Amino acid sequence: MVHVIDALSAVLPPSRIVRDPDVLAAHSRDQAAWAPQGAAVAMVRPEDAEQVRKVVAVCAEHRVPIVPRGAGTGLSGGANAVDGCVLLALDGMDRILEIDAAEQLAVVQPGVINDRLRAEVAGHGLWYPPDPASSPWSTIGGNVATNAGGVCCVKYGVTRDYVLGLQAVTGTGDLVRLGRRTRKGVAGYDLAGLFVGSEGTLGVITEITVRLLRLPEGTPTTIVGAFGSLVEAGRAVAAVGASGITPSALELVDRYCLRAVDEWKNMGLADLGDVLLLGRVDTGDERAAAVLQECFDRAGATWSTRSTDAEEAEALFSARRLAYPALERLGPVLTEDVCVPRGLVPEMLARIEKHARAHGVHIANIAHAGDGNLHPLIVVPAGDDEARARAQLAFESILDDAIALGGTVTGEHGVGLLKKRGMHAEVGEEVLAMHRAIKSALDPAGIFNPGKII
């Protein structure tokens, strides 16, 4: 390892190389507390794509693993260090290089924070729709690496739908451009799309060209429904899916999450009901708002209402975003990210409740219910190893049920370390062989984030 440090020192300024053990430890994992982590030998903080290229060339020559990382907000262990690796921190490459209002696109470095990009393009009358719950802190590079979703993706799509092109460093140390700037283009394989969701296993993304939309006008309408059980709320979700309307958001928050947020922020949410559905429709779509509320009522809502102003609507959705950190205050959280067909959301929620009882664990639920993306959150008392083992069994059972219902083990968080077994069960050996062949072609030295996904 002395040789690789010397080689890195020859191509980078000394200030770009970090070896302090405390700093390395702080940057050696993401937010997936249950995923294992290794010990890095160094962290590099490149300033530009050329420095990234030099780092990759050095690590490839010395067969040293590289683990790229952004803000570390991931939830599957995808940015966790492996033993003997070099951490490649891209958060300092945070420039917005171009905003083209006429073509409705922006070009950014990977360290740009999601909400900062949104704010910048809004000044040009434009909108970047992908909105993961971590948007105030997560980086565009990390969002691309995991194909992040969010609240509004039920109508507006996920990160992949907004990536036009990339610049990346391959395993051979080449700096290449993939994709395009135009709205249409079918020349060759979709290699840019291949990098989206690859979790740093195929190369290092150094620049992203994203598609933008016109900024919506006015204030959307929020519809809230309270339900006596998860299954009843799931029936409402299925009814919305069958209604022919597409809300811009449809979120589920259960009583455990509501109580946790109340205990932390004293918002009085737990008094509203055992399960809340939060629907949102775009400005002026009164028909969609009426249909959404009718779906809630017919499915058995104990009450439903519409927001009367923007502040009230935003408060309800902020509670949804606060659910995960509120639960973390109660103990380590093992986070699921399964996705099933919308019509099977009631069945999947019933199975999650069954696993909570069978394994004797506490499972809270939040969900991007409009697209069938469920986030069961298994909360375990700190230091309770027996409960931790039961939680892991429940976690794996939920993954198996999602597959059995025709769903997937991850809708937006990525595979990382936590869902490798589930991913392998989902895709099968033949498809895994295709994954391995692609990785071998793009990463011949096997240095990019080894041990993740496959």
Image (cartoon, helix red, strand yellow):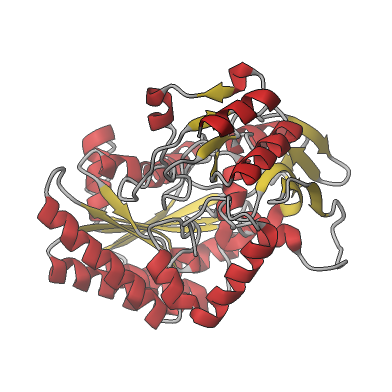
Residue 338 lies, in percent from the top left, at: 41, 66
Residue at (36% x, 47% y) in the render: 32
Q: Is residue 369 positioned above or below 335 on the image?
A: below
**Farthest residue in the front direction?**
3
Residue 368 lies, in percent from the top left, at: 45, 59
Residue 391 shows up from this direction: yes
Front-most of residues 234 and 79 = 79
Residue 340 shows up from this direction: no
Q: Is 404 left or right of 64, judged from the image as shown? A: left
Number of numbered tags placed on the structure image: 0
Q: Is 172 left or right of 379, judged from the image as shown? A: right
Q: Is residue 270 positioned above or below 47 on the image?
A: below
Residue at (46% x, 46% y) in the render: 74
- Classify residue 336 by image quadrant: bottom left
Residue at (84% x, 54% y) in the render: 180
Q: Is 414 left or right of 128, judged from the image as shown? A: left
Residue 266 lies, in percent from the top left, at: 25, 34
Residue 289 lies, in percent from the top left, at: 53, 61
Residue at (72% x, 39% y) in the render: 53
Front-most of residues 24 and 12 = 12
Q: Is residue 67 positioned above or below 278 on the image?
A: above
